[in-house]
């Protein structure tokens, strides 16, 4: 069974997502529509980009992922259809696909422009229903994206700035807070691979993080490994190092927001056997 | 794949909607259940009627739409099964089907009364699970609604008052606010067709709206076309003229509620070529 | 079509549930995934246990029910796969399956331990995605639970304390408040069968309840049968006697919480014909 996933900031109260599902099922009755979330923070492209990075790769081959966080609806912003070796993504050209483009080999990108694959009447305020949904249904059904619109070079698309961690020396790695999630956890740009690389044979208890002039000792395995209201660092389920506070908000605790820098230090020399 | 849509005010916290889905799938395992919303404002029949009008027509032929906003559950209010040329609707007889009955050719209506199509035990508090769901599953599976209960004339059903716009003269159209949505937008009874008819060859910038002694000039294409906190008028995704405030609440801005009247004026004579 | 139900406290904002669905569909593309709720109160095992009891039995034979309310994630708490004659349940061993084990004949229970049925990499913070989901998919697909891990005796599992009503004499039954739901209704341990048994031929208007030194007369059929802000007792949709307040909170009204006792009294001798 082919799959289309839906991620939007339309909220769960109104019938907007329902209308999108009707459009999809009318075009392609045997597709499975999977709700990811419709409660993405309104117009928050960065939040949506992180959420997308957190789920897309778990889906079967040929899944079509639709992301509608689209503050530019009604303006002349482009809509992209992006094809990797395994999935297709339909999203506004506003940076929400940045992480996908960094991680996956992009096969083709087109600008969604061919009204033959839109609803007959396209409203000015609801492209989710009138453009994104029918295009996703047609693509899932097998329409080649080359028929949806003209090719776009990856370099011409809108990207979010994505900081990268920097190794200062053998014992020091600096990184940046890329997102504050709704629990106040500080997600950093240090992913699990970069962290493992930096640690080498050093044990997790012998790394410390400095942020806003304060220090956290040791890498935790669970949020509960720190006392209540105590800070900790942990590799989160999205595979990035996070600064968290057990049952609290790290953002408030450290008075830290997106863009804040942090640095990791090995407190004991690694002793490779 | 046959489709049943579910729209309720049961909320997303509890398992009530889950129980409904179990009942449906037990009777008809191969039906696709589509969640529209379960966060409709509690007991707000008018809100539910507008939401229903916003999505039903986008669904495939033979879809069964279930709407459970039912302040009268446990009283002797009727439940209706209503058949149009394309869809069937299962809903309480409380006016929630008013817009459907105004727009669609109604083929048949019955009062849902035959316990052969209910759960074996019917609770007094949860007809969504014990009556609406099994009836929807049986109808989707092909049971003729005539077997569900006795015929009801359209004229005998409960209707919401639905105001209609009135053309005062060639340059003036009056309308009424029919609903305040949760963003504070004022939905009116002037639909896109009536508006186009009134405008004729007049350009969108040459119409103005008066409401509560204030005036809005020109018809907008996007919510963002007015400045922040500035009012605008726009045809919304439900195809009705709305009074909105960019990033704000028109209801608060104009101190206007459901029932408020407004009038449109052409500020320049139309010059048909 | 086989069914997997999902009940979690992950919330609707983030993509966590979406990732679980992707994992399931990758392993078993033709399964129907049914969302029950993802808004269970965080870490509230008792609430989740009541919710589960409210929906599981309405699902078709062979449904796999996944419940992830798991404050112990990352510790050495067990995960159980429990098989009854009709369903399989995948849940942490924290008491959330108590009601199921009391009501259903348990065929087998195993401790979920075989990594062959997990995601290749198992994160420390997200077993919902990396353990519960793949195990559910494999079990739904037909893997015998004996292959998932070693057998566990029912007596070795964690249970919630489940009070039982006590018949003091022919005219008096005592019970206990087992849960305060989010509307402030007080759910008791007196189920519909126990109540019917106690009532015998006595009419519903001739039973009264005493709680916190106050008395409610008569058993209601609908929440609206009491005046606004007036207390009532009613058999709820989960089939237990509830103390409620029409359009209000019984918990606040009676200043009563979980564990509070109540007693029912027949105010008129039953007159069996």
Image (cartoon, coloured by chain):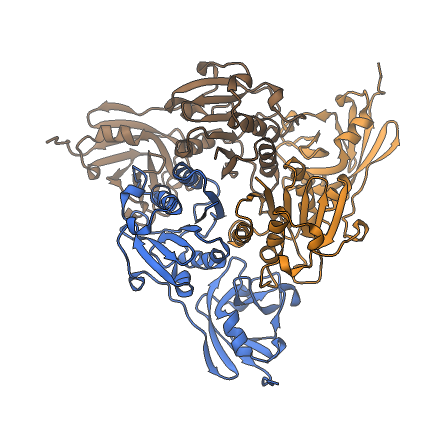
Chain colours: A blue, B brown, C orange
Residue C152 left/right relative to A252? right
Query: Is B33 placed left or right of B179 in the picture?
Result: right
Name which residue lies at 48% across and 58% down. A57
Q: Is residue B135 above or below residue A126?
A: above
* Percent position of residue C138, x then y: 61, 51
Task: Tell me, yes or no, if residue B257 can be seen here.
Answer: no
Outermost right residue: C169
Residue B184, given in percent of the width and then of the height, sits at 41, 40
| Residue at figure coordinates x 43%, y 68% from the top left | A259
Decide if residue A8 is on the left or right side of residue C238: left
Most extreme residue toward the left is B273
**Which picture quadrant has residue B28?**
top right
Q: Nearer the viewer, residue A48 or C80?
A: C80
Residue A102 coordinates in the image, percent (x, y): 40, 65
Residue in the picture at 79% in, 49% down:
C154
**Quarter of the image holding residue B165?**
top left
| Quarter of the figure with the C terminus of chain A | bottom right
Q: Quadrant of residue A209?
A: bottom right
| Location of residue B260 with respect to A65 vertically, above or below | above
Asked if one can make out residue A123 in the rendered structure from this viewpoint, the answer is: yes
Q: How many marks?
A: 0
Q: Nearer the viewer, residue A2 or C186?
A: A2
Give x and y (percent) for residue B133: 57, 30
Q: Choose between B10 and B225: the one closer to the eye.
A: B10
């Amino acid at each position: 069974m082919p799959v289309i996933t839906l991620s939007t900031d339309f909220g769960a109260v109104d019938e907007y997502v329902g209308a999108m599902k009707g459009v999809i099922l009318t075009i392609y009755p045997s597709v499975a529509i999977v709700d990811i979330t419709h409660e993405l923070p309104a117009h928050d492209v960065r939040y949506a980009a992180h959420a997308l990075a957190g789920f897309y790769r778990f889906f079967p081959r040929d899944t079509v992922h639709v992301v509608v966080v689209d503050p530019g609806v009604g303006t002349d912003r482009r809509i992209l259809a992006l094809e990797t070796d395994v999935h297709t993504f339909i999203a506004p050209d506003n940076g929400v696909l940045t992480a996908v483009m960094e991680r996956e080999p992009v096969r083709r990108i087109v600008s969604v422009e061919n009204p033959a694959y839109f609803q007959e009447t396209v409203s000015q305020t609801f492209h989710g229903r009138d453009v994104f949904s029918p295009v996703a249904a047609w693509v899932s059904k097998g329409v080649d994206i080359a028929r949806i619109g003209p090719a776009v070079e990856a370099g011409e698309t809108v990207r979010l700035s994505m900081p990268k961690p920097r190794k200062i020396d053998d014992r020091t790695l600096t990184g940046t807070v890329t997102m504050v999630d709704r629990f106040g956890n500080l997600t950093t740009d240090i992913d699990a691979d970069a962290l493992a690389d930096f640690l080498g044979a050093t044990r997790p208890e012998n790394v410390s993080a400095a942020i806003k002039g304060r220090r956290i000792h040791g890498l935790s395995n669970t949020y509960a490994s720190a006392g209540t209201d105590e800070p900790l660092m942990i590799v989160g389920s999205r595979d990035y190092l996070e600064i968290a506070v057990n049952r609290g908000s790290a953002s408030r605790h450290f008075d830290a927001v997106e863009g804040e820098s942090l640095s990791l230090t090995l407190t004991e020399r690694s002793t490779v056997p």
